[in-house]
Image (tube, helix red, strand yellow):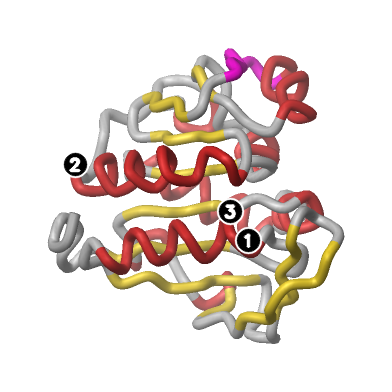
Amino acid sequence: MAGALDGLRVAIIATNGVEQVELEQPRRAVDEAGARSTLVSLSTDAIQAMNSDIDKGDTFTPDAAISDVSADDFDALVLPGGTINADQLRQSGDVVSFVQAVFAAGKPVGAICHAPWTLVEADLVRGRTMTSYPSLRTDIRNAGGHAVDEEVVVDKGLVTSRNPNDLDAFCAKIVEEFGEGAHPVHDEGATAQA
């Protein structure tokens, strides 16, 4: 996979409560494939990662605040999970707008575990087939998406997985999808043309 993503810029959006392995392993995968990843958060204050949502992990210093970046700065996006992380991100208007702009440009996105909550909030799951942590599947269906229980699902450049056990498949698939570049823009939800 080395060199598969040479020159690509990948945003990884996370905040306090991010599931550490879901931040570290995808970041390592895209970096090892040649991409330049940028950790973006709600501010540039250090964020506290968690292990299994309950045990404190390491802290990470973001490279940029969401208010200081644009979707135009990146070629792809990774949204790690973690219940607290995802719940905070979906409440940020800046994060929601950023994610909508990424989707509107057809850029590939990887979202694992609880991360699809932000996609639900941004009205980006309507008409899509995807997976997530089990507790989000009703939210996905209520937002017009088709929720399935599979290790990894791809729908027009959107890669989703259920939990840390799926990370190997998730990382391999995001590298593949990110390497393909922009995908056709989905015609439902926030990406619908007026």
In which quarter of the view is residue 13 placed? bottom right
Check disc 2 and report the residue beneath it. 180
Check disc 3 and report the residue beneath it. 80
Check disc 1 and report the residue beneath it. 94
Identified by mark 1, the residue type is: Asp
Where 61 falls versus 142 (above or below)? below
**Residues at discs 3 and 2 in contact (Cβ within 8 Å):** no
**What whole-number distance in Å separates the C-alpha atoms at marks 1 and 3?**
17 Å
Q: Give the quarter of the figure containing the C terminus.
A: top left
Dot 1 falls on a residue whose secondary structure is: helix
Is 4 on the left or on the right of 31, as rendered? left
Q: Residue at x 72, y 51 (%)?
A: 86
- N-terminal of the pair, mark 1 or mark 3, is 3
Magenta segment, which residues? 143-149
Identified by mark 3, the residue type is: Pro
Task: Say if the magenta span includes residue 83.
Answer: no
Q: Give the quarter of the figure containing the N terminus.
A: bottom left
Identified by mark 2, the residue type is: Glu
Residue 61 % position (x, y): 60, 85
Q: Which mark is residue 26?
A: none
- N-terminal of the pair, mark 3 or mark 2, is 3
**Residues at discs 2 and 1 in contact (Cβ within 8 Å):** no
